[in-house]
Amino acid sequence: MVLKSLQINGFKSFADKTTIDFGTGITGVIGPNGSGKSNLTEAVRWVMGEQSVKSLRGERMQDIIFAGSDTRPPLSRAEVTLTFDNKKRDLNWDHDEVTVQRRLFRDGESEFLINGRKLRLKDVANLFLDAGLGRHSLTIISQGNVEAIFGNKPEARRFLIEEPAGVAGFKLKKQQAQQQ
Ligand code: ATP
Ligand code: MG
């Protein structure tokens, strides 16, 4: 799976529309303390469906919207977009390019879109789980998480392995089927 770009607009410290194009190979992000490196990874987790406000270092979900600075007023919405090259159909979506977008407005209204189509959080979660990716997956390890992983109970650690292996998606579908 190839992540082509990340676009952030109004998420945390990213008040201006910011696009990061990922080339081939490894991308490193460097910058002084407080410059927004962690905010970047949080933006990725958020657009992939992160629902834990605490793990986004906030108290309410709206805390992820740019809150204003000495020189700029607060914004009314946050938007993050991931663009994938899907020529190999790593994502179960019949397009060569897939964009996944999440928006949140200050009144609490939120939206998920895949290729511009409004869908549910569940659809976005399934799209990534089927591809062995997910918001809890080992593909994103945040600051402080390494210790948490080693300190975890075995069952919790197993989940971290099941998600990239694609097992978590099956388990979720089984659970959903059983509830119906
Ligand atoms: P470190 O090297 O210390 O880990 P970092 O580069 O990871 O730093 P972040 O934690 O990503 O930095 O960024 C923190 C900055 O983001 C702080 O200055 C904080 O004020 C700002 N910030 C967080 N939420 C918002 C928000 N809603 N609106 C505006 N700025 C925000
Ligand atoms: Mg950081």
Image (cartoon, rainbow, N blue to C red):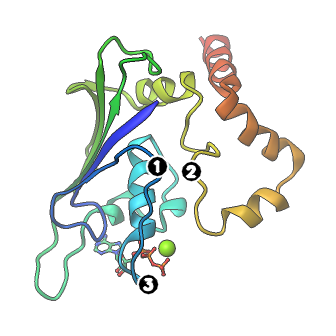
**What is the number of the mark on residue 33?**
3
Residue toward you, 102 or 7: 7
177 left or right of 46? right
Q: How far apart are marks 1 and 3 (CA)?
A: 20 Å
| Residue displayed at 42% across by 73% down | 30
Identify the secondary structure beneath mark 1: helix
**What is the number of the mark on residue 140?**
2
62 left or right of 30? left
Circle 1 crowding by C-alpha within 10 Å: few under 14, some 14–19, many from 20: many
Q: Residue 146 falls in which quadrant of the image?
A: bottom right
Query: Of callouts 1 and 3, which one flags the residue occurring earlier in the amino acid sequence?
Result: 3
Q: Name the residue under label 1.
A: 45
**Label 3 CB, ligand 1: below 8 Å?**
yes
The mark closer to the camera, 1 or 2, is 2
Query: Of callouts 3 and 2, which one flags the residue occurring earlier in the amino acid sequence?
Result: 3
Q: Residue 159 falls in which quadrant of the image?
A: top right
| Residue displayed at 44% across by 58% down | 42
112 left or right of 137? left
